[in-house]
Every structure is written in C-alpha cells, then in structure tokens.
Image: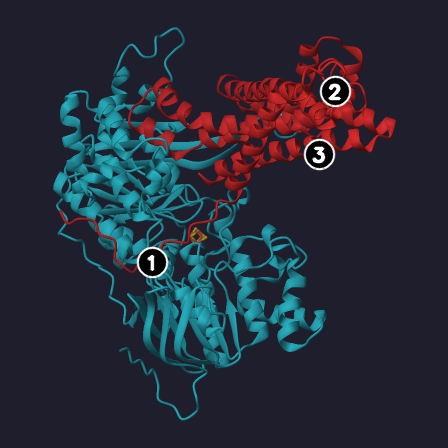
Chain colours: A cyan, B red
C-alpha cells in the first residue's frame, strides 16, 4: 500500500485520492494510491510508456479513459487538463480556440479572454513580436504552441492544473524553460500542478515532489546512473579522422537563376581514437545526425574528408566512373572493408529493418556482404551469438520486424551493427524511441558490448548528462558548428559555452539560462547563432561568428565572451 | 548474457486497430467476382437469345451487357494501371539519372492532369475512333495520372526508407539494394496504386456509353442499356443494368479503398 502524505494541512488539499485503484482489464495500472497535492505545490509523476500516467491524469480530471475501471476515491477541485500532445485543433485560428476555452471557464468575451491570454504569455516569456493569434496552431512552431497552451491555463487560472506529457517533443533547453515558468506560476498563484511525463522528459526537475509509476505503484524515483557502467579505459590511437566535414543541400534557384544551397554542417574537424567514446551533443538543427551520417558516408559529406585507417572514404564512396563495371570488384576501393569496420545505429531501429524479410534473413545478407570469410553454414551460429550478446533470444532471428516491440527493435539494431565485428559504432540517438527502464537497459547493453569489444563509439544525443556519462570526450554542436569540445569530465563539471551550460542545466532539470526558441535553419542570425537567446550576448556577437579557440589543453570553446561572467 | 525480458506491466498491447478497409475490400472483391461469374454464365440463362437482346428477359440482358462492360473495364484498368505505374517509375528513374528537378516536373504533370476532367475524353474518343483497343487506351489514359501520382508517392516514401540506408551500410551495392530490398517492398504498393484505375475506367466507360458514345453496340454495355432504356422510357429494362452498374462501381471502389487501407496500415 502506498501512502504519500505530502503535507498535513488543515484545509483540504485541492487534489486528494484515497486508495485509488485503476484497472485496465485485469491489469493493475494503479494500486491503492493515496495522493495529496497542496496549493502551490508541483508534483511530477514519471513513468515509462504505457505505465498508466495518462490513465491516472484522466481519472483525476474526471475523464476515465475507455476500458479503465476505477475503485477508491479521487477528489480534485476546479481542474484543467492539458492532454497529451496539447490537443489544439490544428486548423482553427488560435485566438478562437483560446477565447473558447478561457471564455468557457470564466464566462468572458473574446477581448477580455485575449487580454488574459496576453498576460499568460507574458508569464511564459513569449515576446510580443512572436504572438500571432490569428494563425492556426499548425502554422506556429511547436514551442510557441506549448507556450500558448500553458498561457491558456494561466489565463483560466484553475485550482488544479493537470498536464500530461507537457512540452514533450521540444528540445530540452526550450522545454525546461517553459516548464520552469509554468511551475513558477503555480507556486506564485497557489495552483496545485501535476505534471506527468516520461522520466527523461525532465518534468521531475521542476517539481517539488517526484513519484514514479512503476508496476502500479507510486514510488520515489530511482536516481539515474551518473557514473560509467565500468571505469572507462584510456583510448588508443586515432583511427577515424574527419577534416572539414561539411554538408550542404541544393535549394531551388533564387531570383536571377543563381543556384543556392543551404549549408547545415560547417567544416567539422574530429578524431576518434580506438576504444574512445565521443558524445555528440546538440538539439534539433545542430546537425549532429548529419555529422554522424557523414562519418559513415551515408551519404558522403559535400565538403572535407573522412579518413578511416589512412583511407579516404569519400573517394571510395563516390559512384564508380562511367564505363567501370559496377559489380566486378567486390571491394572497390576498400569501401566494403570500411563498412565492415564502421557500423551505424539508427534513431528509429524499427524502420531500419526491411519489413519484407525476417531478421535472420537480413542478418544473413549483412554477413554475406561484409563477412564473406565466414562460411555459409557458420552464419546462423554467428547470428545467434550476436542476438544473445545484444540481449535477445536467438529465436528472434525467425521474427519479422513488424512483430518486434520498440525495445526489441533497438536491441536487434545493435545486434546487426556488431554482426560484422566492427571497430566503430556510430550511433545517432540510438535510444530515442525508448523510455525509462527500457532506455537504461538498452544503453547498458550498448556500453557492455562496447567494453567487451573495445569499440570506438560516436554517440549523438540531445541528453547532455546521459551522453557524457559513458563518454571520454564530448562535442557540443549548435547550428552545424562545434561550440565547445572537451573531455567528458570537464564538460560535465565546468562547461564554458553558454549553450553547453544551458544543455547541462536542462538535462538536470534546472532552469536553462537561454531565452526564446532556436531559429530555423533558414533564418540563422548573422554572427553567433546563439546570440538571440544568449544571456551574455553583446553587440559584437552579431558581427562575427566566434571561432573555436583553445582555452585550456584539449578544451575548445567558440564564444567571444566565454570568460565574462553573466550579468545579474 | 541476460535474456531480454519485457517487464510484464510496462507495455499494454494497444487494442488491435479494426481493419476497416479490409472487410470492405474483401466484400467488394466478392461482389465483383460474383458479378463476373454471373455475366460469364449469362448466355446459358439467356438461352441463345443474345442477338435479340431487347426481347430477352431484362435481367439476363443486363448480365449479358456486363460481359462487355466488365471485360472492357478490366482491359482498360490493366492498361491504365500499367501506364500509371510506368509513369511513376519513369519519374523515379529520371530522378536518379537527371536530378530531382526532372522528377518533380514529370510527377507534377501527373498531379495536374489527375485534376482535369479527363473522363470527358472517353465519349469524345468513342465518337471519333473506331477500334475498341484504341478506346481502351484512351480510357486507360484517363485513369493513369491518378495512379501515377499515388504510385510515385509510395515510391518516394520507400526510397527514403531507413532500411535502404541500413542495407547500404552493410555494403550492398546499389543493384543488390534494388533487387533484395526495393523491388520486394515496391510490388505491393505499386499494385495497390494500380487498382485505383479500376473504378475510374469503369465509370468513364459507363458514362461514355450512357451518352451512346462508348463501346460499340455489338459488345453491350450497362451504360448503353441504361441510356437506351431511359430514352425509351422503359423502367423494366432500365432497372437491372442500372442496379448492376451501381453494384459493380461500388465493388470496384471498395476494392480500391480496401487495398489502399491495407497498404497504409502495413
Ligand atoms: S558569442 Fe556572444 S552570443 Fe555567442 S555564445 Fe558567446 S556571448 Fe553568446
């Protein structure tokens, strides 16, 4: 039996449940939970996918989800529910929807509703210039939509606000900024705020109390692992080099028929040593995924060079010259050898398998292509081995990709990557589709595999602490440029670039010191790409893009004012 | 190595989504097959009266007409589906050989033409050209743009699929990627797009025949019989072909829908 009495107060708390039990069929979603949230208190309920958070919030809001049975008592005063994903009608002008909701709750007309909404947006820190009420939500950036939803809640001013997966899908720095503002409002106005989200969404950081929904129980959360799984071994010599790796895409010709292009990756230099783990940290638009793919030459970058063991991969990955027979040379220019050594992990493992073939067939194809030295009758044995190493049963080879759960697909992706005995894994958000325990299990498996095989690993992720936890070195990327690179310890304890600091704060649930949203790739500001959000920005930041300079041995920062303390 | 076990309570299986389109498609196929069978067996019922169709039992006459309508629709649909798929494949090929601009132009043309009232061409052609195969070709052409647009959408989704990147990462040369991964995954969506031609050509032909500008009278057609009966003001002769035509159109649409729904789901 859970008993969570957060405060004992004389006044009845706005949210109170007594032995609340939720059943989905014969599955217990929530087992006799006693929950109490006071005015001005922020409670976070975390849990993995399908753990019952949404059902709990729906029940508190008096909307029992279909198929869920309830026992026990739940009493919630004047509440407002922000449902998963926000649920704004995508095509109707925002102003109308806001007026409807605010007007419905407070009985106000359109103008007073909008005025209250404007106050709410002030509290969410949305600048007046960004307020475009006449646009439908689908034309507004995701972050602004969430800010509007929160502002709507502020405008209504309920006694209890329930938010399911608030601001999920936003970049961590943007999400945490909004969540902190929402929590500030709740504390200042005495609103009981209940946030539900996946553990990696950072709702816990802003809350006064955190409970994790695990197997029907509301328990205090397990602190995440902060140390590497096993002590990291010092890396060897550098084998993979990127020199000035850049990527640009052609755009439709501009006025006057001039050909234009959009450069998303600006000349990155990088070395990867044997047994080294390098974290590529960055949010949407940082081009960390593009960099990861460029290193694999899938597709090859448009500028610079990628060199693996002294061989220029871009030359070998180029299509064969006309007239040269394609299939004749099984290892043209050593590309296949390089493919065997460098293997990717995909952000959406489920879609990286051919739906028309069983796992075993696909693995067999990989072996046939990359390891012709393994005789055909040994292939099955090899496939069973890697499946087990990646934490799956050997029978998984017989399954179709569509029959795999997300977690199993991630593990299968890992199994395929180590099938050819590679030396380097290049992983682009490999756990993006996983949450909570599944995520930890997968990352632990990945690290175990890495250590056992002494692999080099490039791990692109938007989660700062999680990425650096098992890494030797980290590179923080912003808008296709490196803004800070240092060893993992330095980045974890004393990052210097304002963006690295914001990412670190966000990953710890603290308030990131950045304002506003990331600009789109098509509207980058002149000068430093961070300058519209940066707390240290000065006039000069608009004039020159800061170059990467060495501030300490092995520690590079690209900021004009990294050594200036923030004002105020 | 520890086995990977799912925590028993962490993933509720989402309720099976109802396969709405599937049942509809299946019943459509059943209805169309029954119609085709009945039409094929009609001469037995009509007792050799095929020549004097108007004197015969109206139901048997309508079934006899169905032979013309259905076989023509089948011919034109195969042609139209083939043309549309070829169009999409050509666009894809141009895309890889001559750059995305050429691909976009080719398929933009299909999109534009899919919006035109191309069905009007069929009575025009019926009035102007003689041979049935030419009429079938024109009818096929009216359905091809829509098929091409859909087939191309499927093609380009597939071309971006992550598993093709995974196959390249496994060092498979492009030819192998095509043979092992692309073609097996392409057949079904392309065929599904091709089926789209069936209701279109059936409707176009019936419309033309209704105006008296469709299939030659010797072949017989539901549209022609409906038109004739309407002009003669004969409700008994009017009802059977009209009902059968409506049924066939519904069945063709249901099949196309069902195939599309199944496609989207997988
Ligand atoms: S260069 Fe200026 S705007 Fe950019 S991070 Fe440094 S202080 Fe901020």
Chain ID for label 3?
B
Q: Which residue is mark 2?
A: B122
Which residue is tagged 3? B243
Label 3: which secondary element:
helix
Q: Are marks 3 and 1 in contact (CB under 8 Å)?
A: no
Q: Residues within 10 Å of mark 3 (few under 14, many from 20)?
A: some
Residue furthest out toward the right: B232
**On the picture, is A479 further left or further right than A144?**
left
Circle 1 residues within 10 Å: few <14, some 14–19, many ≥20:
many
* Residue A430: percent from left, percent from top: 31, 44
Query: Which numbered marker is on residue A504?
Result: 1
CB of mark 2 near ligand 1 (< 8 Å): no
For the residues labelled 3 and 2, the Cα–Cα distance comes to: 22 Å
Is residue A187 placed above or below A331 in the rendered structure? Answer: below
From the viewer's perspective, is A467 left or right of A246?
A: left
Tell me: is circle 1 under 8 Å from ligand 1: no
Report which quarter residue B35 is drawn in. top right
């Amino acid at each position: 039996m859970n008993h969570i009495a957060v405060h004992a107060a004389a006044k009845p708390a706005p949210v109170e449940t007594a032995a609340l039990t939720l059943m989905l069929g014969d599955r217990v979603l929530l087992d006799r939970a006693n929950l109490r949230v006071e005015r001005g208190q922020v409670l976070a309920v975390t849990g993995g996918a399908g753990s019952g958070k949404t059902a709990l919030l729906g029940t508190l809001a008096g909307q029992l989800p279909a198929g869920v049975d309830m026992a026990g008592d739940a009493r919630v005063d004047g509440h407002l529910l922000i449902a998963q994903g926000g649920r704004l009608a995508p095509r109707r002008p925002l102003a109308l929807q806001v007026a409807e909701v605010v007007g419905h709750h407070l009985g106000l007309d359109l103008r007073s509703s909008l005025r209250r909404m404007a106050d709410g947006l002030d509290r969410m820190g949305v600048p007046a210039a960004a307020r475009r009420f006449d646009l439908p939500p689908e034309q507004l950036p995701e972050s602004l939509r969430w800010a509007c939803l929160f502002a709507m809640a502020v405008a209504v001013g309920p006694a209890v606000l329930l938010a399911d997966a608030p601001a999920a899908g936003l970049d961590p720095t943007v999400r945490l900024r909004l969540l902190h503002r929402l929590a500030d409002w709740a504390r200042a106005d005495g609103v009981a705020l209940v946030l539900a989200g996946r553990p990696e969404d950072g709702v816990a950081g802003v809350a006064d109390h955190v409970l994790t929904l695990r197997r029907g129980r509301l328990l205090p959360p397990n602190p995440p692992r902060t140390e590497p799984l096993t002590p990291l071994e010092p890396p060897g010599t550098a084998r993979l080099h990127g020199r000035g790796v850049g990527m640009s895409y052609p755009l439709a010709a501009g006025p006057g028929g001039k050909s234009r292009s959009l450069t998303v990756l600006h000349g990155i230099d990088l070395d990867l040593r044997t047994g080294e783990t390098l974290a590529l940290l960055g949010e949407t638009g940082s081009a960390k995924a593009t960099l990861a793919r460029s290193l694999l030459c899938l597709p090859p970058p448009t500028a610079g060079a990628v060199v693996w063991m002294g061989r220029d991969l871009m030359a070998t990955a180029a299509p064969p010259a006309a007239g040269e027979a394609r299939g004749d040379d099984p290892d043209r220019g050593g590309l296949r050898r390089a493919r065997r050594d460098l293997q990717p992990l995909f952000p959406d493992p489920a879609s990286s398998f051919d739906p028309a073939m069983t796992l075993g067939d696909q693995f067999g194809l990989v072996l046939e292509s990359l390891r012709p030295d393994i005789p055909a009758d040994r292939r099955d044995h090899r496939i069973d081995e890697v499946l087990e190493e990646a934490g799956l049963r050997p029978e998984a080879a017989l399954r179709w990709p569509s029959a795999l759960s997300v977690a199993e697909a991630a593990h299968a992706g890992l199994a395929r990557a180590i099938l050819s005995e590679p030396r380097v894994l290049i992983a682009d958000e490999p756990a993006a589709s996983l949450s909570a325990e599944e995520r930890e299990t997968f990352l632990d498996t990945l690290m175990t595999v890495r250590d056992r095989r002494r692999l080099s690993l490039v791990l692109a992720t938007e989660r700062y602490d999680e990425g650096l936890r098992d890494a030797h070195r980290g590179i923080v990327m912003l808008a296709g440029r490196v803004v800070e690179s240092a060893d993992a310890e330095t980045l974890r304890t004393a990052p210097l670039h304002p963006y690295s600091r914001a990412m670190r704060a966000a990953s710890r649930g603290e308030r990131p010191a950045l304002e506003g949203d990331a600009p789109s790739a098509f509207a980058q500001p002149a000068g430093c790409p961070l300058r519209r959000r940066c707390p240290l920005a000065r006039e000069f930041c608009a004039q020159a893009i800061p170059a990467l300079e060495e501030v300490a041995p092995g520690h590079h920062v690209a900021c004009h004012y990294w050594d200036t303390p923030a004002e105020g | 190595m520890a086995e990977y076990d799912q925590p028993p309570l962490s993933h509720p299986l989402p309720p099976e989504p109802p396969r709405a389109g599937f049942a509809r498609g299946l019943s459509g196929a059943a209805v169309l097959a029954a119609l085709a069978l009945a039409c094929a067996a009609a001469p037995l019922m009509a007792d050799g009266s095929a020549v004097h169709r108007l004197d015969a039992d109206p139901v048997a006459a309508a079934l006899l007409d169905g032979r013309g309508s259905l076989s023509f629709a089948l011919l034109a649909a195969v042609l139209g589906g083939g043309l549309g798929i070829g169009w999409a494949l050509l666009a894809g090929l141009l895309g890889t050989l001559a750059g995305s601009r050429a691909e976009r132009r080719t398929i933009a043309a299909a999109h534009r033409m899919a919006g035109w009232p191309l069905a009007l061409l069929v009575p025009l052609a019926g009035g102007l050209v003689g041979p049935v195969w030419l009429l079938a070709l024109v009818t096929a052409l009216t359905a091809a743009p829509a098929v091409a647009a859909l087939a191309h959408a499927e093609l380009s989704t597939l071309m971006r699929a992550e598993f093709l990147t995974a196959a390249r990462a496994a060092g498979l040369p492009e030819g192998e990627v095509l043979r092992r991964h692309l073609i097996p995954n392409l057949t079904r969506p392309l065929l599904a797009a091709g089926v789209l031609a069936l209701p279109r050509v059936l409707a176009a032909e019936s419309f033309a025949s209704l105006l008296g500008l469709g299939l030659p009278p010797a072949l017989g057609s539901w549209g022609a019989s409906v038109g004739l009966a309407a002009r003669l003001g004969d409700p008994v002769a009017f009802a059977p072909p009209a009902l059968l035509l409506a049924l066939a159109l519904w069945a063709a649409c249901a099949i196309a829908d069902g195939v599309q729904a199944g496609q989207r789901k997988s």
